[in-house]
């Protein structure tokens, strides 16, 4: 009969246990020194090795030839415990044996000496399921058991166990196993089972298992049934995961406020039978990763992704503020709760994403506070706020391209509001001398802030202007760059529009944009290097013969 992988590869010794050195090292030392406690409590999340360590402990206590605190696995008692023929080791499920009578039978049995083994060991799994009466009945025996009895209690919910029980046990906390440790174990098992498994697929299985090695081995078993050569796509299809590409695409739609495209993505995923609850959960995890990247400098220990995925995450994190990420996560969590309650999953998912891509439709308190906060920040920076049909529309004037020698002062666009015209009065329409504008230009101190804001509108444009400088001169903003491609971008209406919006957000002013080139006076004021050398020679008293 086929044996599933998590049973076949259950650890046989403490050295085989993955990711729990804080437990295994202490237990081995106790066994080697002979300082065996009468009651142990193993607590931690599912699939972290609690029951496995309890069984190893039971074998190590009774092994005839222990090795460094580990059971030998070959003696009569070790083999008998493995096949269940040694009756002195009892494993009890408290979920189905939780009454006072069940505990009383354990107490009665404990008074008898073991038949074959040295210790009579009781492993009570899910001990938090015992009734209050059962705990009270166990209390006295747990405190002062016979010398030949050892209790090992295991639970996932330690907060449900009475304090009187906790105080009588030696407690060991099992941590969630790291994705790296799970991936190493999966690769080891796959190699011995003849299963093709690459590192990226192992890491994906590890991240899905959420720190539970048993769940990871179960998923590996299912993937191996689908295909003996396991790839990332095989894991995604078997586990019902949404590919990371969809997560990045949906996040881009949220950043750009593209409602139509995000609904089209949901339509495609729904047609591929993707579970909307799972998709929402993965989106929450994705924005949690963006929050980690936004908050911390070093994220290698917290995020287990390829370098390409980390680079893409960093780009998206730079395009969002921390407030945006928290707000999006809050909306998704609210949608996930509604999906979990059995409502129409697709509709709830679509409503959540519409709220995120069209914020004016969200009338919740958190959404209104977020919009009010954005208005307050705009007012503090001196940005004019106008009332229009579109709540996120910003009044930005249009402009003509600035030539190298002259700047045309065109009147403001018709789109500019009356309030905006008061703040930025129209010019007379006459041509201005370019050299005069350059002569009065001063460096813009807020230029780095402008580039940071520009990332929220266009990451590629912000990258193109990364090493540039800017100079302000009246109503003109001149950009200094050695790269001609920078100015080619600036000539494109959409790119120029993004730059104007970024400048407006930071400075509260509307500028006309153009290239920065030093005027002729500044250029001519520079001396020839040979002339400077001759002047220095004359000043030092050296006779210099000049050509006629």
Image (cartoon, helix red, strand yellow):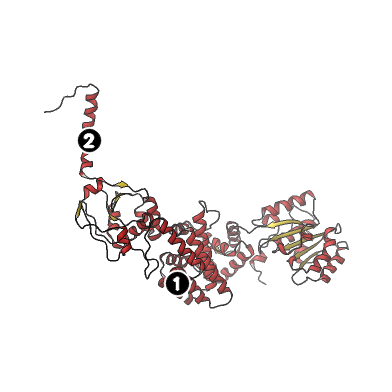
Residue placed at 53% from the left, 78% from the top? 344
Q: Point out residue 350 in the picture as x, y percentages from the top left corner.
A: 48, 74
- Of 333 and 358, the residue lying toward us: 358
In this rendering, position of residue 539 left or right of residue 140? left
Q: Position of residue 221 (x, y in %)?
A: 60, 68
Residue 306: image x %, image y %?
A: 49, 58
Name the mark nearer the viewer: 2 or 1: 1
Image position, residue 353 (x, y; %): 47, 70
Q: Is residue 501 left or right of residue 172?
A: left
| One can see residue 443 in this view | yes
Mark 1 Cα shell of 10 Å, populated few (<14), some (14-19), many (≥20): few
User: Are discs 2 and 1 less than 8 Å apart at CB?
Assistant: no
Seen from the viewer's position, the closer of residues 529 and 16 is 529
Q: CA distance from mark 2 to mark 1?
A: 63 Å
Question: Which of the pair 483/152 is nearer the observer?
Answer: 483
Vertical placement of residue 481 versus 104, above or below:
above
Identify the residue under disc 1.
Answer: 361
Instruction: Give the labeled residue for mark 2.
Output: 527
Residue at image location 67% in from the left, 72% down from the top: 1
The quadrant of the image that shows the C terminus is top left
Q: Sort mark 2 into few (<14), some (14-19) or many (20+) by Cα contacts within 10 Å.
A: few
> Which structural element holds mark 2?
loop
| Left or right, residue 477 beside residue 272 | left
């Amino acid at each position: 009969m086929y044996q599933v992988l998590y049973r076949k590869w259950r650890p046989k010794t403490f050295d085989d246990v993955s990711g729990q050195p804080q437990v295994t090292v202490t237990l081995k030392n106790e066994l080697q020194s002979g300082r065996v406690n009468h009651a142990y409590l193993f607590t931690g999340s599912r699939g972290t090795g609690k029951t496995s360590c309890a069984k190893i402990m039971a074998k190590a206590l009774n092994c005839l030839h222990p090795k460094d605190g580990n059971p030998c696995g070959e003696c009569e008692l070790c083999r008998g415990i493995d096949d269940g023929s040694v009756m002195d080791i009892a494993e009890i499920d408290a979920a189905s044996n939780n009454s006072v009578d069940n505990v009383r039978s354990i107490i009665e049995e404990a008074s008898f000496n073991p038949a074959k083994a040295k210790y009579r060991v009781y492993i009570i799994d899910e001990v938090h399921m015992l009734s209050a009466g059962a705990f009270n009945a166990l209390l006295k025996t747990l405190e002062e058991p016979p010398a030949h009895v050892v209790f090992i209690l295991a639970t996932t919910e330690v907060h449900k166990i009475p304090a009187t029980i906790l105080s009588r046990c030696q407690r060991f906390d099992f941590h969630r196993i790291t994705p790296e440790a799970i991936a190493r174990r999966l690769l080891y098992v796959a190699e011995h089972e003849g299963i093709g498994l690459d590192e990226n697929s192992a890491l994906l299985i590890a991240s899905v298992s959420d720190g539970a090695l048993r769940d990871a081995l179960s998923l590996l078993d299912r993937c191996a049934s689908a295909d003996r050569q396991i790839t990332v796509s095989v894991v995604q299809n078997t586990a019902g995961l949404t590919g990371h590409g969809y997560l990045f695409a949906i996040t881009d739609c949220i950043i750009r406020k593209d409602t139509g495209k995000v609904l089209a993505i949901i339509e495609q995923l729904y047609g591929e039978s993707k579970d909307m609850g799972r998709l929402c959960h993965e989106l929450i995890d994705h924005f949690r990763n963006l929050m980690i990247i936004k908050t911390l400098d070093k994220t290698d220990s917290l995020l287990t992704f390829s370098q390409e995925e980390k680079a893409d995450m960093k780009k998206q994190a730079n395009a969002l503020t921390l407030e945006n990420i928290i707000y999006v996560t809050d909306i998704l969590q609210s949608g996930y709760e509604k999906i979990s309650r059995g409502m129409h999953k697709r509709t709830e998912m679509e409503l959540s994403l519409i709220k995120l891509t069209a914020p004016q439709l969200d009338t919740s308190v958190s959404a209104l506070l977020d919009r009010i906060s954005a208005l307050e920040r705009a007012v503090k920076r001196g940005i004019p706020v106008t009332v229009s049909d579109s709540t996120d529309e910003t009044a930005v004037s249009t402009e003509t391209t600035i030539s190298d020698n002259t700047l045309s002062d065109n009147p403001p666009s018709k789109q500019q509001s009356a309030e905006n015209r008061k703040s930025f009065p129209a010019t007379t329409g006459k041509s201005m001398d370019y050299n005069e504008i350059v002569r009065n230009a001063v460096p813009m101190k807020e230029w780095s802030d402008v580039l940071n804001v520009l990332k929220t509108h266009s990451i590629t444009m912000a990258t193109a202007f990364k090493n540039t400088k800017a100079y302000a001169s009246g109503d003109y903003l001149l950009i200094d760059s050695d790269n001609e491609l920078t100015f080619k971008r600036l000539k494109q209406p959409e790119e120029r529009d993004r730059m104007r919006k970024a400048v407006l957000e930071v400075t509260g002013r509307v500028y006309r944009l153009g290239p920065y080139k030093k005027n002729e006076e500044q250029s001519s004021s520079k001396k020839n290097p040979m002339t400077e050398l001759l002047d220095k020679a004359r000043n030092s008293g050296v006779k210099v013969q000049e050509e006629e």
